Image (spheres, grey):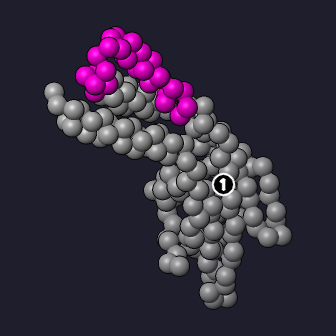
Amino acid sequence: MDLPILSTSLLLSLLSLIGLGFFIRASVKDRTKQIKLTNSDPEEVLFNKLQTYFENRAYKVTALNKETNEITFQGFVKASWFLAIFLSGLAAFGLFCLALVLSFLYPSLGNFIWLILLFAPIAGVFYYRNACRLEKVLLKIDTVAETETKAKNYLTITAHRDELIQLQKTLSFDTVES
């Protein structure tokens, strides 16, 4: 092969490995988000519903402030074995492409260039070590009286993005436009 083709292939392989590195790093990024929801259930019923929901999802109440109606739940989130293996596979594929280009560019290195494939499992280990963590859910309930007999609850929830999506799917809340 020609040198310009091989050097271009090397550059593209290196750029894709840089992108893969950012992808692997983003797999453990904190995705905490805050949303506002409304519900017309009585405050005590709403609190019990939320407490039951979060306890079923392996969260425990760690702080309860009755004066400000703030509740903090905490739970341990496990890493996904599938994602750890998937990321290691992606890293292996990327390193294989790099080793293939380097083997054409530097044939004098022989089979030693293929040893860089041994670094592929580092991606899975990195994900698995950093994805296991304690997650917090901060919940604040504000009650506003609409009429003398009817009140509306406004919930401000700060949690992981996936947890918020699951909460909205499971329980019936209206989203407040902000």
Task: Look at the image and give the residue range highlighted in magenta.
Answer: 101-127
Query: Does residue 54 show up?
Result: yes
Name the residue beneath numbered marker 1: 137
* SS under mark 1: strand
Q: Is residue 63 above or below residue 90?
A: below
Q: Quadrant of residue 106?
A: top left
Dominant secondary structure (helix, strand or loop) of the stretch shown in magenta: helix
Measured from the top left, where is residue 65 in percent x and y?
A: 82, 63
> Residue furthest toward the bottom?
147
Q: Quadrant of residue 49?
A: bottom right
Measured from the top left, where is residue 168 in percent x and y?
A: 49, 59
Q: Residue drawn 69% across and 69% down? A: 141
**Which amino acid type is shown beneath numbered disc 1?**
Val
Measured from the top left, where is residue 145 in percent x and y?
A: 67, 84
Q: Residue drawn 53% across and 34% down? A: 127
Which residue is nearer to you in this view: 91 or 136?
91
